[in-house]
Image: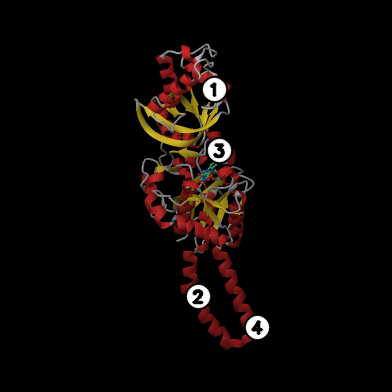
Amino acid sequence: MINDLWFAGKRHSKVSVARNCGVFMIVYLKVAIVFCTETGCRQLMKTKKQVIVIGGGAAGMIAAIAAGRRGAEVTILERNPRVGKKILATGNGRCNFSNIFADYSHYYGHNPKFIKRILVNFTVDDTISFFEKLGIEHKVEDAGKVFPMSDQASSILDVLRYELKETGITVISEAYVKNITRKKAGFTIELANGQACRGERVIIAAGGKAMPASGSDGNGFDLAARLGHTVTSIFPALVQLMLEGSFFKRIDGVKFVGTAEIIHNNKSLAKDKGDILFANYGVSGPPVLQLSRKAGELLNQGQEAYLKITIMDMMSEEEVRKLIRKRFQLNPHKPVDFSFVGLINKRLIPVILAEAGISDLKRPVVALSAQEQDRITRILTDWRFKIRGTKSWASAQVTAGGVNTREINENTMESKLVKGLFFAGEILDIDGQCGGFNLQWAWSSGFIAGQNAAL
Ligand SMILES: Cc1cc2nc3c(=O)[nH]c(=O)nc-3n(C[C@H](O)[C@H](O)[C@H](O)COP(=O)(O)OP(=O)(O)OC[C@H]3O[C@@H](n4cnc5c(N)ncnc54)[C@H](O)[C@@H]3O)c2cc1C
């Protein structure tokens, strides 16, 4: 295509010059054209890469922009009618698009250090300034979370779409890539509708498997595998936990600030504090989502995992015991269930007492044995649940596992196995904690992939 355009341009110059400027000018221009043909234009032909980006999500869009800015001729193939569907769902519609503390310690995968170089080459500051230039003012909230000042995820998508247009990127929607084949020079990309196109460079940014309704349903892993890449075991992360217990329907919707911990072989492996929410299947809330990665990893390996919840996490177990004793002494004839009103969420009281083996909720507290008091104390400070599983892909925010990063060049995002093939975003075996880290990964990996694919 570049060839055709170039030759058409050359013929046009020759004819118009012959009419207007005479023989001398023709000779002069011939020399110029020959010079152009032999050096400059050939150079241009050589450097203007045709880059095909598979997937118009966060990583694919920024990759396309970065490649376009470097002069490549870029086409995004997106299976949805529009690009960027998932972005609209991020940050509860506000798009937590980065985190000022983003470094490799906030990421997981078999090779989390892979991300180090990528985050240095396209940093959080680069991301903020990239979006600032597109019109997004930012604000930093708790734990370093970065949001657009507009509080609208749609503004992030709007400016990206505008920039795609400005950069001359071709976006082909409803283009579901079914297969990619490496040819002698470049790649052939086959679409589900039977059409095919060619590109010298391909960036696979088809996402993972989280929220399949957004278009990323795991098919990108098959594309990568067919090109010879290995894909590590995948499982949903940043997802709610399903717990064993028959009482969850009764406490569905109860919310409190507490601490959650993942326990394996009686050891605490990970811990987080914040708003915890009971649901009819188990538990949700930011600390639970954060810990779900560890739980999923254990379950995926066929191991048992427990969740410890500390409802009264502002005191030690001994302090809680003393507090309960003091309350009982102050009102010895209060019914046991009523004696906890004002201390914990009312809807939790009958469930906690039943778990402590107290069936008569109207017994006066003075009649409770020391063991019964201890059991209540224990539940308030160390309530353990066996984890049945995580919720499904539909509820997950991110994919743990993916394309093996040892097969990717950490400076360029190019495949070490297939020359000219690049990867970006969630499709890779890198996933971040909750708080803007996953989008930062998409921006950084996408930008680096795009820049290098254009070379
Ligand atoms: C509900 C929710 C909230 C989230 N909130 C945040 C947040 O606030 N902050 C944060 O950092 N992260 C958040 N995340 C995670 C973050 O959105 C993702 O990690 C990130 O968007 C991944 O970007 P990506 O471009 O790699 O993949 P995706 O955004 O999944 O994009 C992949 C694109 O490829 C397309 N595609 C797939 N297969 C094909 C194919 N064969 N042919 C053509 N096109 C194809 C898909 O349709 C999709 O558009 C959230 C995720 C969810 C689900």
Of 398 and 437, the residue lying toward us: 437
Secondary structure at numbered mark 4: helix
Q: Nearer the viewer, residue 244 or 163?
A: 244
In space, the residues marked 1 and 2 are separated at their CA atoms by 75 Å
Q: Amino acid at mark 4?
A: Arg
Per the rendering, the mark at residue 248 is: 1
Label 3: which secondary element:
loop
For ligand 1, which image quadrant applies?
Answer: top right
In this picture, is 292 found above or below 322? below
Which quadrant of the rendered structure holds the C terminus?
bottom left
Name the residue that disc number 2 marks.
36
Q: Residue at x 56, y 55 (%)?
A: 75
434 displayed left or right of 409: right
Between tags 3 and 4, which lies in front? Answer: 3
Give the answer, above or below, for where 373 lies relative to 317: above
In primary-sequence order, the first of circles 1 and 2 is: 2
Q: Which mark is in front, 3 or 1?
A: 1
For marks 3 and 4, the one nearer the N-term is: 4
Q: Nearer the viewer, residue 64 or 298?
A: 298
- From the image, tell me which residue sits under label 3: 211
User: Mark 1 and mark 4: span between their CA atoms?
Assistant: 87 Å
**On the image, numbered disc 4 is attached to which residue?**
19
